[in-house]
Structures are given as structure tokens and as C-alpha cells.
Image: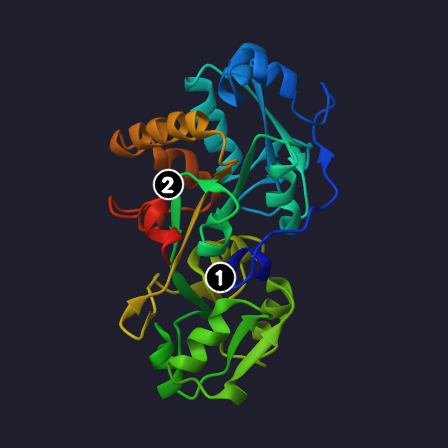
Amino acid sequence: MTSSRRDFLRTAAMLGAAVPLTAAGCSTTDPQAERRGGGTLARARQEGRIRVGFANEAPYGFTDKDGKLTGEAPELARVVFKELGIPTVEGVQVAFGGLIGGLQAKRFDVVSAGMFITPERCGAVAFSDPEYVAKSAFLVPKGNPKKIRKFEDAARANARIGVLTGAVEGDYAAKLGVGKDNVKTFDSAPNAFEGLKAGRIDAISLTRISLADLLSKHQGEPFEVTDPFTPVIDGKERFGAGAFAFRKADADLLKAFNDKLTELKTGKRLLPVLRPFGFTEADLPGPDDTAAKFCQG
């Protein structure tokens, strides 16, 4: 997971170069068709397809070795939109920082990339309710010799913690007592892993989902992911929530999506869609985890 996804203080306003995953049709939506058909939802139903923007970032939305669009968000999109009468989901790859700009420019209809809901982003787009919540965890040597389960444990153990440049974990660590010299910054998760493997740090701090994905790429290595937890700073829980983003004008599409997502949650059909990508029961949103809650910060 890149820092651009997870830093709550940054927005995604710059438009990246969009590359259609499929060759079918034009790379932009048809505004005349939308006017004739009554909006994006009606147009997508009429055409039988919808375009989603993704950032090629595992496990959220990416292309596999065969070039197929997959990941937790695109697979969820396929389930939801099929039930809404839209059988085909086409992907348009965009740099993460260009997802919101691409949506507003109508290069695609929905952002399907596990994007965190933040107050800043809520000013530009309309979010669905979250499909997952991202709690924190640590990647540690097997057996967790320094007994690091939360940042306060790392502070007491004088442990060296690896974080990603610009990500929120560095701030969490500082505010919860980890010494400045013990917070080591890396430009990517793979580089942080190499630092842990070489013994330059004692743990990596990321979301549990990201760490599970990272460890899955290094099977057989002597490391483990700790149980997920939620940092509490100044009396407030700090965790993120990933959701789909829509243009604010597409209120009918957003409502239809949210209604189907609620059906999946209440019918216990959401986790089976997400589980193949490393998500667990602990990553599912609770009944009070709404878009409105995270838009308020």
C-alpha cells in the first residue's frame, strides 16, 4: 500500500495518464447517452457495462499475470454491478493520484481502488459506505521477541519501527512514545521488508491488510503479522476505511450501489468476495462505519 493511499493529509487531485485495460469502446463515458438515458446508472444498464478506475495496487485493484483486472474492489464491483443489471466491468488504469481527477473528467464512472475516505476527498467526490476498515498491525520476526502489539509496546521495548514515507504510522509512533531515532522511514513496503530482514529495524508498521499482502510475497520467511489493533490518540481511534468513489452528480448510482452493498453485508456475502485477497472478519466495517462518519474525520 502506497503512502498516497494511506496518508490522511493528502488529496488525490492530480489527473494521471489513464490507460484502458480493455480495448472495447471509447476511453471516456458518453455524456449524450447519459442525457438520453437519465444518468450514469441508466446509461450503464442500457450499455451493459461500466468503467472503473484503478491504480494497479495489490490487493485492492490490479491486473494479474494474465492481464485480468482483479483485486478486492474490482471483484466486489463485479458482484454489485451484475446485481444492478450491469454485467460487464471494464478497468481504466490511472496513477493513484489521478483517480479523482479521472473520475471528474469522466474517463471512468467509479473509482474502484479501495480508496480511503477522508474529509478532503469528500469535498471532491461522493463515497459509498466502506467495504473494509484498515486497522494497524506490525510485521515482526516469528515469535514476536520484543512483544510488540501496539505502539506503546514498541516505545517500552525501545524498538526500531519501519514506516513508509508520508504515511500516518510515523505520526502515530511519535505521538504514542516511540523515539524519533527509532522511527525509520522507507520509500516502499518491499524496501522496509529488506530492512527488517537485515535487522536494521525490529518491526514494520502498516495496516494489517498491507502487511498480510507483503508477507504473502515472501512465503517461508521467518516473520509474522501481529493481531490488528486501532491506535488511540487524544482519545480518538485512528483507522481508515476503503470505499468506492462516485461523482457527486451520480446520486442514483451511489444509492443503488450502497443498497446492494448493504445487502451483501447483512447477508454475510461480503467477506467471501474479499477473503481471497487477504481480508478477514476483523477487516469488515461495523454498522456504524459509514461514509458520513469518515467524511467528518
Q: Which residue is rendered at x = 58% and y = 16% of the image?
A: 35
Residue 272: quarter of image: top left
Residue denoted by label 1: 8
46 sits left or right of 231 in the view: right
| Dot 1 amino acid type | Phe
- Which type of secondary structure does the marked residue at label 1 adopt? loop
Residue 253 horizontal/vertical position (percent): 45, 26
Question: Type of residue at label 2?
Answer: Asp
Image height check: is 193 above or below 125? Answer: below
Answer yes or no: is residue 31 visible. Answer: yes
Q: Is residue 40 left or right of residue 270?
A: right
| Residue 281 in the image, given as x and y percentages of width and height | 31, 46
280 in relation to 167, above or below:
above
Q: Quadrant of residue 11?
A: bottom right
Label 1 with label 2: CB-CB less than 8 Å: no
The residue indicated by pointer 2 is 129
Q: Is residue 116 visible?
A: no
Question: Which one is nearer the viewer's eye here, 132 or 108?
Answer: 108
Q: Nearer the viewer, residue 10 or 79?
A: 10
Task: Please tell me whether mark 2 sits on a helix, a strand or a loop.
Answer: loop
Q: Residue at x 65, y 39 (%)?
A: 102
Badge 2 crowding class, 10 Å Cα cut-off, few under 14, some 14 to 19, many 20 or more, is many
Tag 1: Cα neighbours inside 10 Å, few (<14), some, or many (≥20)? many
First in sequence: mark 1 or mark 2? 1
Residue 285 percent location from the top left of the image:
32, 46
Q: Quadrant of residue 257?
A: top left
Q: What x and y, as percent, mark residue 55?
A: 63, 44
Of residues 203 and 155, the one nearer the viewer is 155
Q: Quadrant of the C terminus?
A: bottom left
Quadrant housing the N terminus? bottom right
